[in-house]
Image (cartoon, coloured by chain):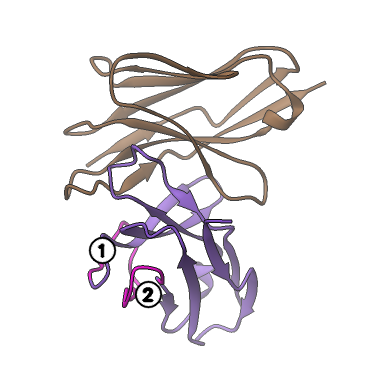
């Protein structure tokens, strides 16, 4: 089976940097995805890492270490609008299509 | 605007009743999925469809059924609702590329079974 672990909540002030860690256990690996979800909204795709290293997209960056089965999402220059839940996800291996399994989510609370 | 449309937005349903949640996409994605989201449990896969005409069971399929008659539509049916099916239901679609291109989610259906 597969499992993903991420912290349940992180609190930080505006302008700060937040790192959300995700560790996964899977018998095989294709890639690690990150999604953002605001309260009452739908999850939206943020990033996908298939190879080791850091990928930057504006204020958000995502990192992957396949040897450590670990990744993180880095939120820089935090803004109030970044208050949301963030989910890491990996594809299952039961078929070539790879249905995503999601972690339980990390709620990020940004304070003034 | 390309995306996924879900209906209804919310519903209160009496236990034992049958209900179909509708999902339509206009992106011509091959794969579609139904997830339920409960507090503290994240998103759990109910059923999926890799292509039109095929469906499969996810992590929590009991009490639910789906069909995929064409590329665009993927309805989810609760044959006889029970209170434990109270949840927020999200439909999603993708190219079926193991998440590389990202999933697109609908806005969700909030279902309360009483």
Q: Is residue B53 magenta?
A: no
Q: Quadrant of the C terminus of chain A?
A: top right
Residue at position x 57%, y 19% in the image: A58
- Tell me, yes or no, whether dots 1 and 2 are on the same chain: yes
Total marks shown come to 2
Residue at position x 34%, y 41% in the image: B99
Q: Is residue B64 magenta?
A: yes
Residue placed most toward the observer, B8 or B71? B71
For disc 2, the marked residue is B63
Position of residue B39 measured from the top left corner of the image (x, y, whole percent): 56, 49
Point out which mark residue A74 bears.
Answer: none
Q: Vertical placement of A22 versus B21: above or below?
A: above
Q: Residues within 10 Å of mark 2 (few under 14, many from 20)?
A: few
Residue placed most toward the observer, A30 or A70? A30
Colour chain B appears in: purple
Q: Residues within 10 Å of mark 1 (few under 14, many from 20)?
A: some
Foreground tag (1 vs 2)? 1
Residue at position x 48%, y 86% in the image: B18
Position of residue B109 measured from the top left corner of the image (x, y, whole percent): 58, 65
Spatial separation of the CA atoms under disc 1 and disc 2 = 22 Å
User: Which region is colored magenta?
Assistant: B54-73
Position of residue A43 measured from the top left corner of the image (x, y, whole percent): 54, 45
The mark nearer the N terminus, 1 or 2, is 1
Colour chain A appears in: brown
State which chain disc 2 sits on.
B
Determine which quarter of the picture holds residue A67. Answer: top left
Residue positioned most to the bottom: B17
Residue at position x 47%, y 68% in the image: B24
For disc 1, the marked residue is B51
Position of residue A14 measured from the top left corner of the image (x, y, whole percent): 76, 17
| Horizontal arrangement in the rendering, residue A65 relative to residue B10 (left or right) | left
């Amino acid at each position: 089976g597969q499992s993903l672990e991420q912290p349940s909540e992180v609190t930080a002030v505006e302008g700060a940097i937040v790192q959300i860690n995700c560790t996964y256990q899977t018998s095989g690996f294709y890639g690690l995805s990150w999604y953002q979800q605001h309260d009452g909204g739908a999850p939206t795709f943020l990033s996908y890492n298939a190879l080791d290293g850091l990928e930057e997209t504006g204020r958000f960056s995502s990192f992957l270490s396949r040897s450590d089965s670990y990744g993180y999402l880095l939120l820089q220059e935090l803004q109030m609008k970044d208050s949301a839940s963030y989910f890491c996800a990996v594809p299952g291996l039961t078929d070539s299509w790879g249905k995503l399994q999601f972690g339980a989510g990390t709620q990020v609370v940004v304070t003034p | 605007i390309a995306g996924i449309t879900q209906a209804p937005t919310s519903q209160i349903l009496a236990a034992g009743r049958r209900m179909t949640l509708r999902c339509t996409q206009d992106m011509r994605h091959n794969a579609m999925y139904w997830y339920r989201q409960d507090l503290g449990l994240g998103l759990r896969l109910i059923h999926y469809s890799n292509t039109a005409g095929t469906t499969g069971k996810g992590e929590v399929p009991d009490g639910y059924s789906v069909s995929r008659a064409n590329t665009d539509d993927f309805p989810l049916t609760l044959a006889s609702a029970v209170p434990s099916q109270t949840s927020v239901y999200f439909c999603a679609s993708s190219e079926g590329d193991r998440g590389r291109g990202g999933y697109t989610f609908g806005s969700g259906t909030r279902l309360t079974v009483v």
